[in-house]
Image (tube, grey):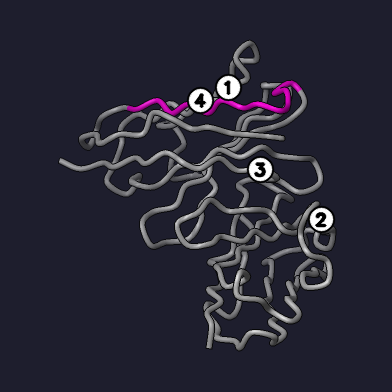
Amino acid sequence: DIQMTQSPSSLSAFVGDRVTIICRASQGIRHDLSWHQQLPGKAPKRLIYAASKLQSGVPSERFSGSGSETEFTLTIDNIQPEDFATYYCLQHNSYPRTFGQGTKVEIK
Amino acid sequence: DVQLVESGGALVRPGGSLRLSCVGSGFTLREYGMSWVRQAPGKGLEWVANIDLFGSERHYVDSVKGRFTISRDIATNSVFLQMNSLRAEDSALYYCARDTPNGGAADWGQGTLVTVSS
């Protein structure tokens, strides 16, 4: 099974900061990775797919993804109050699909 | 717009069975694979099972193999998760998700709660 190691597990940021979350795969997964946002008490929502493609409706000026094979990054520029949530990476390169353990982003 | 609505969650005793349903609208099952993902209280997301767009390939996480079965009904645009021999550790909010070839879990339902307890 492919292990997805996400870091950090939590972070605090001021509104307006840049936030970076990293996901590392235990073996190469090409660009077969998506990022999902989960607001408290809500269902997850996909933000980015194919490592760097933005889901329709997601603010492109704030959210971006990069990386390939074993290292991936989700960046949130100028973080806004509505962005404080838990973020997960998901690999769909092989079965079983696996999520990272999540990164909780809190307001400082 | 794509919409997914899960149902069937309940309180069940260990060893019991439950069948979850997920009805989709705004798309046709013939064109997409579907997954079930669960989230135990206060925990992260765990992928559970997938059925491909042809309805012929099914995959499961090891912890549910032999106990859970994913299936679908094209006529009602529905996906199901038959869960047998339930354990306390299966307690979670179960989400269904529509998969896309380029990025898995493109759309999510709101979830249905399964509690396994005596």
Q: Look at the image and give the residue range highlighted in magenta.
A: B18-30
Q: Disc 3 marks which residue?
A: B107
Q: Nearer the viewer, mark 3 or mark 2?
A: 3
Alpha carbon separation for disc pair 4 and 2: 27 Å
Q: Residue A50 — which label?
A: 2
Asked if the residue under mark 1 is in contact with the one under mark 3, i.e. CB atoms within 8 Å, the reply is no
Q: Quadrant of the N terminus of chain B?
A: top right
Disc 2 sits on a residue from what chain? Answer: A
Residue that mark 1 sits on:
B78
Badge 4 local density, few (<14 within 10 Å), some, or many (20+)?
many
Q: Nearer the viewer, residue B65 or B12?
A: B12
For mark 3, give the secondary structure. Answer: strand
Q: Residues within 10 Å of mark 2 (few under 14, many from 20)?
A: many
- Spot occupied by residue B14 in the image (x, y as percentages of width and height): 22, 37
Q: Residue at x 50, y 54 (%)?
A: A42
| Mark closer to the observer (1, 4) | 1
Disc 1 packing (10 Å; few <14; some 14–19; many ≥20): many
Q: x%, y% of residue B110?
A: 51, 42
* Pointer 3 local density, CA inside 10 Å: few below 14, some 14–19, many at least 20: some
Which amino acid is tagged 3? Asp
Q: Amino acid at mark 1?
A: Ser
- Disc 3 chain ID: B
Q: Which mark is residue B80?
A: 4
Tell which residue pokes out farthest to the left in this image. B118
In the displayed structure, does residue A71 sit left or right of residue B36? right
Q: Quadrant of residue B78?
A: top right
Real-space Cα separation, disc 1 to disc 4, in angstroms = 7 Å
Marks 3 and 1, how far apart at CA: 15 Å
Quadrant of residue B50 in the image? top right
State yes or no: discs 3 and 4 in contact (Cβ < 8 Å).
no
In the rendered structure, does residue B29 fall within the stretch colored magenta?
A: yes
Q: CA distance from mark 3 to mark 2?
A: 15 Å
